Image (spheres, rainbow, N blue to C red):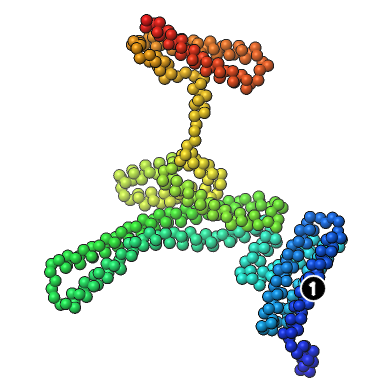
Amino acid sequence: MTQPQEQENRDKLPQNMQAYSCEILQSMQVDIFKIIEETHKKIRSKDILPNDIQKEIAQQITLLQRFQEYILKIYKKNQKKSYNIDNIKYLQLRLNCFKIALDGLFEPPRELMFARKLRYETEYFLNRKLCFGFIKTLFQRATREFSTPTKVLFGLAMAIPIYAIIIPVSLTTSIVLTLMPDIAQIPTYLLIDAAKDKSNVSEGIKKPQVEPTTKAQVQSQLEDALQRISFNLGLLLKNSSLVIMVAFAGAFGSIVSIFIRLDQYKSTDYKESATPILVGFAKPLIGTAFAILVCSMLSSGIITSPLLYSHENSSQKSDENSSQKSSYNSEKQYFLYFTIAFLIGFSERLANDIVKRAEDTISPQDKTQTSAVVHKKTITQENISKALHKDSSMKQISREEVQQAFNTFNYIQESLLAHFQEKDKIEDSTTEQNLVGQSTDIETETEKTTIETIDAEIKNQTT
């Protein structure tokens, strides 16, 4: 472009660019009010609109209000400092897209997908103007445009860096907080020791025999503090390494489970849904939590396993024989917990079964219903012994008499059973529930009668 043409274009531009941009922004605000009024009239003129069309119109108007708020911000900025005229023209283009989308929704054939795509692009444009808006844009694009297996992998990709940072940082923080009381005592001991040395040098006089003893005590306290720190640090590092290994094993099992079950997420029900992303994001966390919980319950003894018993027995034998196998046993323990944690992360059903088992162990339920039914139907030896010793004035009963009472009871029970069988054959019209109710009532009565008959026979024999 030659210099005269550039000069001509500059002359065509308004002298005050700031006023020109303000006029454009004001005209855009007026156009937005007109679009909303026209949309309201079209809705009132239509008798019936499909539900998906109504939903899209509402979303278009909501986004149009966001667009108007953004124009007001630009207008305020333009009053203080001239805004780029190209950006303002781009806003005009976006406003025209709103008009085209709304017209396509009212006039047949209704272009729903076309209007939706235009709305998406305008929404992404407004998100980019926000703080951390690119994250929202990325999440919305993944929800709307990615396939369902890709959504699951996207959520998994978001989760892995977070878990890789949170788990070690949290364990490191816990270690530091645990060792903080012992670490805080070290500067105190060092200051006391330095102060005593300084006083000895400044005075230049030999101290009595008590002073070296005090210095030796300070040094011994310092050494004790360092030994406690080293011991606690070694113990915490050992436990922390085991927890980290269990956590990553549970997360790894969940990740493998996600990859194997990707075919289950190919349903069209998950289209434009954020559920697969949340599944991919949260499933490793669930596997990690269950793995740590189950391994903690195994270590504490809330639930038991034959593998742990065999491992403990082998470790005790190795301590008796030689200390060279201790490293092998520690490796075996790590591999055992890694396998359990991986299976817990891989299978949610296994985790639920183990947690249910732990619940039954901690708070056992009342299981006396079945025992009550059995107690109603049978009379145990304890019941008969109570009946035999019911009267405190009764004389000593021989073993033969007790055996005779048992035989009498067995004869009565067999006769009752035969009677019930004959009764079942005759009364076919009665229902099963009535039979159960009658049998339980008769059986409870027979208990009383049998005990009374046994008491009567024993009294007769004793008298």
At 27% from the left and 67% from the top, the residue drawn is 189
When the figure is inspected, residue 425 is found, relative to residue 61, above or below; the finding is above
Badge 1 marks a residue whose secondary structure is helix
Q: Amino acid at mark 1?
A: Asp
Give coordinates of residue 268: x percent, y percent.
72, 53
**Going 57% across and 55% down the picture, which residue do you hit?**
282
Between 252 and 428, the one lying in front of the other is: 428
**In the image: residue 350, left or right of residue 307:** right
Image quadrant holding the N terminus, namely: bottom right
Which of the 4 image quadrants contains residue 8? bottom right
Please say whether residue 40 is visible from this viewpoint.
yes
Identify the residue at image location x=51%, y=49%.
290
Location of residue 435 in the rendering, given as x and y in whole percent from the top left corner: 61, 19
Across and down, in percent, residue 260 comes to: 61, 51
Residue that label 1 marks: 31
Q: Position of residue 16 (x, y in %)?
A: 74, 88
Quarter that holds the C terminus: top left
In the image, taking residue 356 as reference, residue 73 lies left or right, namely right
